[in-house]
Image (cartoon, rainbow, N blue to C red):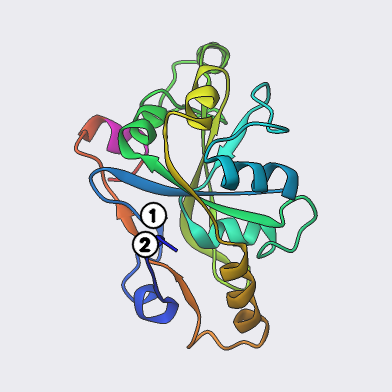
Amino acid sequence: MKLEVTNYKEQEENWPQQGYHIMAQYDNEKIVVYQSYRPAIGNFATQNQFFGGPFSLERMTWIKPNFLWMMYRNGWGTKEGQEVVLAIHLKRKAFENYLNNAVYSSFKPELYASYEDWQADVANSNVRLQWDPDHDPYGAKLERRAIQIGLRKEFIKSYASEDILEIEDISQFVKEQYELVQSKDLEKLIIPLEKPLIFKSEKLNTYLKLK
């Protein structure tokens, strides 16, 4: 795997325990996001290094940069239709472009003069932004919030191909680590290395509640 991994317990000690944080593996050029699919979609993506075949460009797709939040959603790859777990290495500039065009999926009175203004923004936007409770390896809810981003229309089209640097199938890795979770052996649990992501744009950080 090109995905950089390390001991869960060792890095968890240094993570923020509450607030809004984009926990992710990234550098100046790329960021890793996660998705889970049925084999027909996941295997096509891995083999061809883009999303095509049975993957639909007509419906919104949601990406998650936080590994454990993805594991909560897909049941560590055990849920039907989510058996193939993918680590998608994205161009960081593309990820930031998504967020610069994102509209919150629920009304935020501190950002809009009226509910109707927000509805208009939603109608005109093709990127959704949502914060949800983060979760630990067992699925327990945490005080820290995790982000997910929904893409459609021109954004899903660029995400499916040109925004991607590499697609890795990490299903076997997930399966092996889930065995440790099931045996309650978190001292040995290995997960992707993650740290909070902060952007150079103060405007974007403020909009995302990162500061």
- Name the residue type under label 1: Ala
**Of marks 1 and 2, which one's residue comes earlier in the chain?**
1
Residue 194 numbered mark, or none: 2
Residue range highlighted in magenta: 204-208
Q: Residue at x 62, y 80 (%)?
A: 181
**Is 195 included in the stretch rendered in magenta?**
no
Inspect the magenta stretch and tell me whether residue 207 lies in it: yes
Q: Can residue 42 be seen?
A: yes
Number of residues whose C-alpha sits closer than 10 Å to that of mark 2, classed few (under 14), some (14–19) or many (20 or more): many
23 left or right of 130?
left
- Using residue 129 as the reference point, say whether residue 178 is left or right of it: right
Is the Cβ of the residue at disc 1 closer than 8 Å to that at disc 2? yes
Q: Quadrant of the N terminus?
A: bottom left
Height in image: 139 above or below 61?
below
Task: Name which residue lies at 62% across and 87% down.
Answer: 184
> According to the image, label 1 marks what residue?
24
